[in-house]
Amino acid sequence: MLLSSYRALGTVTRQHRLIRHCLFSTQSNDQGIPPPLAGIRVLDLTRVLAGPSCTMLLGDMGADVVKVEEVTRGDDTRAWLPPSAPMASNTPQESSHLPPESAYFLAVNRNKRSITVNFKDPAGLEVIQRLVRSSDVLVENFIAGKLAGMGLGWEDCKALNPRIVYASITGYGQTGPFREAAGYDVVIEAEAGLMHITGEPDRPPSKVGVAVTDLMTGLYAHGAILAGLRSVQQTGNGVWIDCNLFETQLAGLANIASNYLIAGKEASRHGTAHPSIVPYEVFPCKDGFLMIGAGNDKQFRLLATKILKKPELADDEKFANNTARVANRKALVHIITDVLKEYGRDYWIQRFTGLGVPFGPINNIQQTFAHPQVGARQATVEVDHPRAGKVKMVAPPVTYNGVRMSVRRPPPWLSQHTEEVLQELGYSQNEIAELRACKIV
């Protein structure tokens, strides 16, 4: 399938992308910055959350992310519904056999193109090899050694493209006794300490409300890939990045890890409370909850005198400084709780506002997106999806000179760009039809 002539084609494709990058770079932008990864192609062999969140961040920066999915099902999260986006009345005919777009998939797959390839078949493997040759970055989250067994490991891809940045995202890393174990966020939360410190002290351990270890790993991988691209600029040599959930979660233990490694101090669960600061936890009001964090003596005095109207607390030797408050935690928490329960949440929000005592209401998700800061910062964005119509999502959370990177592409429907990408790789219409007939793409 034109393999013998592809090296020249790959060179042409790379030159075309470099020219396009130069055009992006020279365009004037008086407010934001040009997309820094324009002209960079990312071959995305990931699914679920850690990998897709990483490649989405690269896409947000302007990279051309080509997401390779399984031919019939696609990314696992496409089937994780309900909830899903409603189907538009004018959905493309060629996608009419597909289920609705799941909300989970839509959350982490913007700014990507989707193609489907069965690369267990030799003809499908050739498609991926062509993509490797024309890509700057490959991101994968298969079990360690799996892709190498299929001819797509680091050494295989480096031979095809010596400048490639090859990022492997796994559960436990490329070496060690757990290298072949699958990585699941909730398991790593348990095994790497996070679940042990999460939850109320008198209740069983709890997981965090979102897959935070997956998301942290995606962030670490995204930063490592940017460093890898810089290294390629400096040395001309590709880079193999080994990023995993286990070590990410160890790093995420932060001061808890330091407390143990330096002082041998074991951690415990404190719910929303802080082991070394009082009051610093969630308190119930008459009709809701407030998080209060009086982190120093000045803030505690303001809380006692101006908000709770109990100035005697600030002068009581049992509560006069933080050390005393920690020692008398139970009594102080009981006093504050009794006062706050007298009135509703909105009453206390008014009392707290503007005095310099850290606080915040415990908002549900509806209240979160109704927060005035969401609107003021334009923290959500609405995109046109070809199957779902208008879709609202969280916007990229970083601004450059006050401007966010744009959502250039809505999350793709399964195989939306297969023919487009294959044509870029040099496949003819007849060859594409043959691949489709054989269920290779």
Image (cartoon, grey):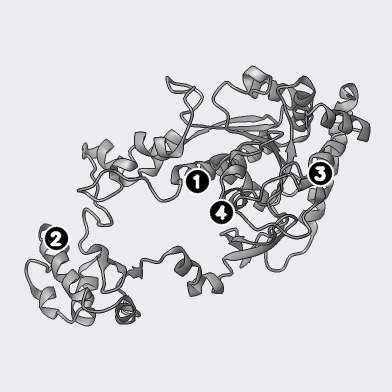
Q: Quadrant of the N terminus?
A: top right
Callouts 4 and 2 close, C-beta under 8 Å: no
Residue 296 x, y percent position in the rendering: 23, 66
What secondary structure is found at the residue carrying circle 2?
A: helix
Q: Is residue 428 left or right of residue 55?
A: right
Nearer to us: label 4 or label 2: 4
Residue 106 x, y percent position in the rendering: 62, 52
Q: Which image quadrant for residue 8?
A: top right
For disc 3, the marked residue is 17
Q: Earlier in the sequence, mark 1 or mark 3?
A: 3
Q: CA distance from mark 4 to mark 3?
A: 38 Å
Q: Which residue is at a point 54% across and 26% down the rendered structure image?
A: 143
Callouts 4 and 3 close, C-beta under 8 Å: no
For disc 4, the marked residue is 83
What secondary structure is found at the residue carrying circle 1?
A: helix
Q: Is residue 104 left or right of residue 412?
A: left
Placement of 86 over or under 129, stated as above or below: below
Q: CA distance from mark 1 to mark 3?
A: 30 Å
How many neighbours does mark 2 have within 10 angstroms: few (below 14), some (14-19), or many (20 or more)? some
Residue 430 x, y percent position in the rendering: 93, 31
Q: CA distance from mark 2 to mark 1?
A: 34 Å
